[in-house]
Image: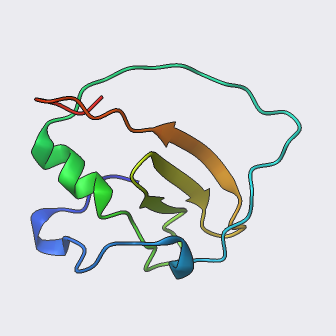
Amino acid sequence: MGLAPQSQSPTRVATADDWECQPMPTEGTINIYINFLLSHAQMQKILMGHIPTAQEDHWFMYCTDSYIRFFRSWTGLLSSKHIIVKRATYIE
């Protein structure tokens, strides 16, 4: 899933109620720690989330104040959960 081009920007914020979300499987999961910085503009696009509109679109994504969550669109299974760390001048 990439960010939507300007002409296809989402019109509303995605929420957990927009998809049949299932919890992450408890077996076979690992924690991976990565850090990267996003600009305010980049984070604003991500916070809108992503609702699949075609069968070929494999991801549903929504955000809360603390997490970005990615789900497989076909199964609804939580694939990854990312912690949002807000800083004064950037978001980590």
74, above or below 71, in the image: below
- Residue 86, how many percent across, how many down? 27, 35
- Residue 26, how many percent across, how many down? 85, 42
**Could you tell whether 53 is left or right of 10 in the image?**
right
**Could you tell whether 30 is left or right of 55 in the image?**
right
- Tell me what residue is drawn at x 47 percent, y 60 percent: 61
Q: Quadrant of residue 20?
A: bottom right
- Tell me what residue is drawn at x 64 percent, y 48 percent: 79
**Could you tell whether 68 is left or right of 25 in the image?**
left
Residue reaching furthest to the right: 27
- Tell me what residue is drawn at x 22 percent, y 80 percent: 11
- Tell me what residue is drawn at x 21 percent, y 34 percent: 38
Which quarter of the rendering shows the C terminus?
top left
Between 80 and 53, which is closer to the camera in this rendering? Answer: 80
Q: Quadrant of residue 73?
A: bottom right
- Residue 32, how many percent across, how many down? 60, 22
**Could you tell whether 20 is left or right of 42 in the image?**
right
